[in-house]
Amino acid sequence: MSTETIQVGQAVPDFALETYNPATGDFDEVSIEKQKSEGRWTALFFYPADFTFV
């Protein structure tokens, strides 16, 4: 796995994540490529998992 540094204003490389969808009560996949193709704005933020030391 490689790590990339992204600056404000740069395009985010495509990636997909498994997510929980409370509307369906099941797991889904969200991909940046699909969000871009549907013209959706996407805000990315990350936080440490619960019970981890920061």
Image (spheres, helix red, strand yellow):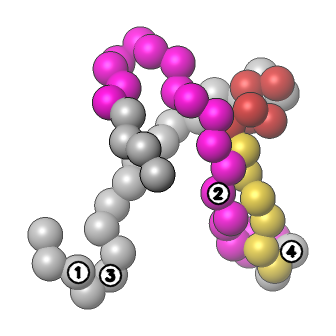
Element assignment for label 1: loop
Residue where numbered disc 2 is placed: 17
Write the residue at 38% across / 54% down. 46
Amino acid marked by disc 3:
Asp
Residue 21 magenta-highlighted = yes
Q: Real-space Cα distance between discs 2 and 3?
A: 19 Å
Q: Real-space Cα distance between discs 1 and 3?
A: 6 Å
What segment carries the magenta color? 5-23
Q: Quadrant of residue 53?
A: bottom left
Residue 36: where, in percent of width, then height?
73, 26
Q: Is residue 19 left or right of 27 when viewed as pictured?
A: left
Mark 4 crowdedness (10 Å alpha carbons): few <14, some 14-19, many ≥20: few
Which of the marked residues, 4 or 1, is nearer the chain's N terminus?
Answer: 4
Mark 3 crowdedness (10 Å alpha carbons): few <14, some 14-19, many ≥20: few
Residue where numbered disc 1 is placed: 52
Residue where numbered disc 3 is placed: 50
Residue where numbered disc 4 is placed: 24
Which of the marked residues, 2 or 3, is nearer the chain's N terminus?
Answer: 2
Write the residue at 26% across / 86% down. 51
